[in-house]
Image (cartoon, rainbow, N blue to C red):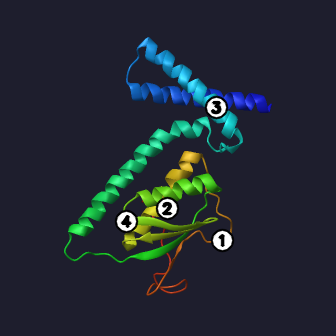
Amino acid sequence: MARDNGLGKKLLLSILLFLFWVALTATLALYDLVLGAICAAFVAVITVSLLGRALNPRITPAVLLRLPVFTVRLVWEIIKANYDVAKIILTPRLPIDPRIVEYRTYLPDDLPRTVFSDSITLTPGTVTVELEEDLLKVHCLCPYHEEGLAGLEKMVAWLFGVKKEVPTGSPMTPTLQGEGIAQPGESGSTFAGGEG
């Protein structure tokens, strides 16, 4: 059974590497296709043999098929955030109010949480300062940058096929923490979790 699983991983990785080869070479010449297939198979066999157990089980064909769509959506969010930050910089009044936001994610394990954390950091105006278990500490340049966190989380959940399960009695709303920022129970202490 483990042998079949290893063969499936090698085949999947070979196909992905071959497609990457074709995209990079931008040619369908027989020589290039044969060379690409041989190189892809060789790299896949070596990679799975050395790292087979280390490959994350969450990386499935469904995730790999959704990855290009996720990448395009993430790039669009990065473009929008770049425009927003450029507008802030060019505004003489600099309407900024930096803060650290604690955000509790429903993403279930390390890989989705890491992708979420990295997506936040790639988006200008926000930087993940710390990720511990399901709690992220995110530095936001402006208060409204917090609203994009829920949207990014939703994108990552879609990528990995994760459904949001809200346990009864447990709040999913992030709270703000920091000097001069209202604490839980005070007015304006929680964030509404926009769909960003």
* Residue sitting nearer the eye, 150 or 91: 91
Query: What's the residue type where badge 4 is placed?
Result: Gly
Query: What's the residue type where badge 2 is placed?
Result: Ala
Please state if 60 lies on the left or on the right of 91 as rendered: right
Q: Is residue 29 above or below residue 184?
A: above
| Any part of residue 189 in sight | yes
Give the residue displayed 61% in from the left and 30% down from the top: 44
Q: What's the distance in space between the residues labelled 1 and 2, CA to CA?
A: 17 Å
Whichever of callouts 3 and 1 sits on the residue coming sooner in the sequence is 3
Dots 3 and 4: beta carbons under 8 Å? no
Whichever of callouts 3 and 4 sits on the residue coming sooner in the sequence is 3
* Residue sitting nearer the eye, 75 or 35: 35
Where is mark 1, residue-wise?
170
Image quadrant in which the C terminus is located: bottom left
Where is mark 4, residue-wise?
125
Q: Residues within 10 Å of mark 4 (few under 14, many from 20)?
A: many
Image quadrant in which the N terminus is located: top right
Query: Disc 1 or disc 4, which is closer to the eye?
Result: 4
* Residue sitting nearer the eye, 156 or 131: 131
Q: What's the distance in space between the residues labelled 2 and 3, CA to CA?
A: 39 Å
Marking on residue 150: 2
Please state if 34 lies on the left or on the right of 170 as rendered: left
Marking on residue 46: 3
Whichever of callouts 2 and 3 sits on the residue coming sooner in the sequence is 3
Q: x%, y% of residue 19?
A: 49, 27
Give the residue displayed 37% in from the left and 61% down from the top: 124
Q: Is residue 95 above or below residue 23?
A: below
Query: Disc 2 or disc 3, which is closer to the eye?
Result: 3
Query: Disc 4 or disc 2, which is closer to the eye?
Result: 4
Query: Disc 3 or disc 1, which is closer to the eye?
Result: 3
Give the residue displayed 65% in from the left and 45% down from the top: 56
Secondary structure category for the residue under label 4: loop
